[in-house]
Image (cartoon, grey):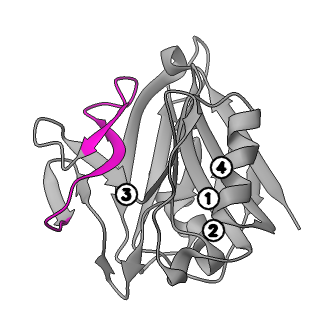
């Protein structure tokens, strides 16, 4: 059992990328290719196609007729929880909104997301917050945990066998190759190698 939780000051973030993998590369291969400082698995997918609203670098990868709470941004430090699709933003992702304005949201999800299983989430609590755990939790337990940690907003991402991360060297690996991942790149400090 493992759990990784990170809180990254927005002022340290250079950019946040939605990396479209189409279920081809492993987490380690993506880390090697991108050099991202933090990586977590992203939204839901079936095979090589994303489901739920997903837009990366201006290209829409998945849409449906409904609007959901999700994160939208252009570069990353400007990330906000808003209704997606968000046509004015270059990137957005959604799944199950857990927290909004520091308060628990009414959870809406299907049986495929129910039960006690591995979980991944992203959120904000003054900083960009990332969460990945193989300990297992229900959506309700995850919501309560993140609210207790002081997160102001949170969205549960894909879980189960998809939950994986590399958070500044703290790795939770999975055998599943996922469709999309959230990659965070930090500003380099003076003297850091490029």
Residue indicated by mark 4: 143
Question: In this orientation, does residue 108 appear?
Answer: yes
Query: Residue sitting at 29 percent across and 47 percent down?
Result: 92
Tell me, for residue 163, which label it has, or none.
Answer: 2
- Precedes in sequence: disc 1 or disc 2: 1
Is disc 2 placed on a helix, strand or loop?
Answer: loop
Q: Circle 4: is it few (<14), some (14-19), or many (20+) Cα within 10 Å?
A: many
Q: Nearer the viewer, residue 114 or 31?
A: 114
Q: What stretch of residues is rendered in magenta?
A: 62-83
**For mark 1, what is the residue?**
120
* Residue toward you, 30 or 110: 110
Structural crowding at the residue carrying mark 3, measured as other residues with C-alpha within 10 Å and reported as few (<14), some (14–19) or many (≥20)? some
Q: Residues within 10 Å of mark 2 (few under 14, many from 20)?
A: many
Distance (Cα) linking label 1 and label 4: 11 Å
Secondary element under disc 1, as helix, strand or loop, is strand
Q: CA distance from mark 2 to mark 4?
A: 16 Å
Question: Which residue is most to the front?
Answer: 106
Look at 53% across and 19% down and name the residue there: 12
- N-terminal label among 2 and 4: 4
Q: CA distance from mark 3 to mark 2?
A: 15 Å
Q: Which residue is mark 3?
A: 19
Q: Which disc number belongs to residue 34?
A: none
Q: Earlier in the sequence, mark 3 or mark 4?
A: 3
């Amino acid at each position: 059992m493992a759990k990784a939780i990170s809180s990254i000051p927005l002022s340290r973030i250079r950019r946040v990328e939605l990396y479209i993998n189409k279920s081809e590369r492993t987490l380690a291969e993506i880390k090697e290719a991108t050099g991202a400082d933090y990586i977590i698995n992203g939204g839901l997918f079936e095979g090589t196609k994303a489901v739920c609203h997903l837009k990366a670098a201006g290209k829409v990868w998945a849409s449906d007729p409904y609007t959901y709470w999700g994160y939208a941004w252009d570069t990353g430090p400007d990330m906000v929880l808003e209704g997606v699709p968000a046509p004015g933003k270059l990137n957005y992702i959604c799944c199950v909104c857990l927290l909004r304005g520091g308060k628990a949201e009414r959870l809406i999800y299907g049986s495929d997301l129910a039960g006690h299983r591995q979980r991944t989430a992203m959120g904000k609590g003054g900083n960009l917050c990332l969460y990945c755990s193989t300990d297992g939790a229900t959506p309700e337990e995850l919501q309560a945990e993140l609210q207790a940690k002081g997160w102001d907003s949170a969205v549960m991402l894909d879980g189960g066998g998809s939950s994986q991360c590399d958070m500044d060297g703290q790795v939770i690996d999975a055998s599943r190759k996922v469709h999309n991942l959230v990659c965070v790149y930090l500003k380099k400090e003076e003297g850091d190698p490029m």
